Image (cartoon, helix red, strand yellow):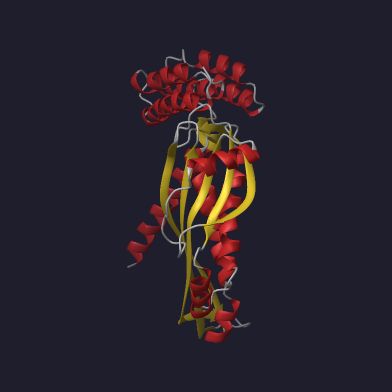
Amino acid sequence: MTQKIVKSTLFISLLFFVVHFLSSCTSSVLLTIMKPADVTVKQHIKQVALINRTKPSNTVMNVIEGVMTGEGIYQDAEASQEVINGLNLVLKDSPRFHVISTGLRLKGSKTGNTFTNPLSWSQIEQYCKQYNADAVVSLEVFDTDFIVTDGSIVETKKDENGNEYKETVFTAKGVASVKAGFRFYDPKTKAIIDQNLYNRSRTFKSKGASVKDAIAKLIKRNAAVKRVGFVMGKHYGFKIAPRRVTVKRKMYKKAKHSTDVEKGKRYADVNDWKNAAKAWERAVTSPHEETAGKAAYNLAVAFEVLGDLEKAINWARAAYTEYGNKDAKGYQRILEHRVQQEMRLKEQMGTE
């Protein structure tokens, strides 16, 4: 038994040393890049009007449902607006579109949980003229649910003297679910660019001295579905609009046989990537393969930061094939994927 404990301790110590050693040899750099949208929208569409078309056409049935389920009559109206707010936030942040949030809430399907017939093109043209827009994105399906369950768990706690004791704690769990459906209307081509249904849920938890206490501490239904709806709106925005994302890249801080690797890192620390690249170009001539591989890898990072993806790919390939840097193989694939994304991005943004 003692021998097993000693072996386990030695293994943990060795693992800690390896992790610490690796982290001391590398650092990371954060890059902000543009990610293309999943849906490519034609260039004539610059200004987009947002419409909420989820007002139930059967108001009486909606009121009855609200009473029977315990939902506030106007709660889904507030939550559906949060979907619009989330979508509006993302589109405003994208350089691709100018967005107009119309504030309109139109009647849709009887229940709100299925698509009804599309808006007529004369209606779409009317809204585009009214709001000076080229296209309309309409939220046309919206339905929510919030299911609460309760239970209990036994937790181990310590008193003021450090003595352990068992205590039963009561729990409550609320699962907020949102279904939303969007249509993207292009009146110029008389085409619905995109039409899709989405489902999203999130679990909220609370604890208390009793079941009643735990439920009282749980987030309220309206707040929960509004949070989920807001995130759903943002995610639809990510689908139709290019966006800025932050990515992390590994970089070597130093190498045994060249001070230029460390010198280049210092230049990179002050955002002088051209001089950093010059230092690493000197280091890559080292006769030591490991040092040259680290320098080549760093050069790939430098040229990605500088916006020259072709040179970045060439240096990543050299780091792996010429100098045996294993991490560079995966980095090359990442860079090649970025080239493909850049091609799609240029098409979406209308740039050469």
User: Which one is in front, 133 or 271?
Assistant: 133
Residue lying at 48% horizontally and 29% vertically, measured from the top left? 42
Q: Position of residue 20 (x, y in %)?
A: 50, 44
Taking the image as shown, residue 54 lies to the left or right of residue 334, namely right
User: Which residue is depicted at the point 64% across and 36% down?
Assistant: 132
* Location of residue 281 in the rendering, given as x and y in whole percent from the top left corner: 51, 14
Q: Is 227 located above or below residue 93 in the figure?
A: below
In the image, residue 299 sits, relative to residue 140, either above or below, namely above
Quadrant in which residue 30 is drawn? top right
Residue extending furthest right?
270
- Quadrant, the N terminus: bottom left
* Residue 211 visible in the current orientation: yes
Total numbered badges shown on the rendered structure: 0
Rendered position, 261 above or below 14 = above
Foreground: 95 or 191?
191
Q: Quadrant of residue 195?
A: top left
Vertically, is 183 above or below 74?
above
The reply to whether residue 136 is visible in this rendering is no
Q: Of residues 34 and 113, which is closer to you in this image?
A: 113
Depth check: 252 or 119 in front? 119
Where does the image place residue 22, in percent across and percent down from the top left?
A: 47, 39
Q: Position of residue 339 (x, y in %)?
A: 43, 24
**Residue located at (41% from left, 24% from top):** 290
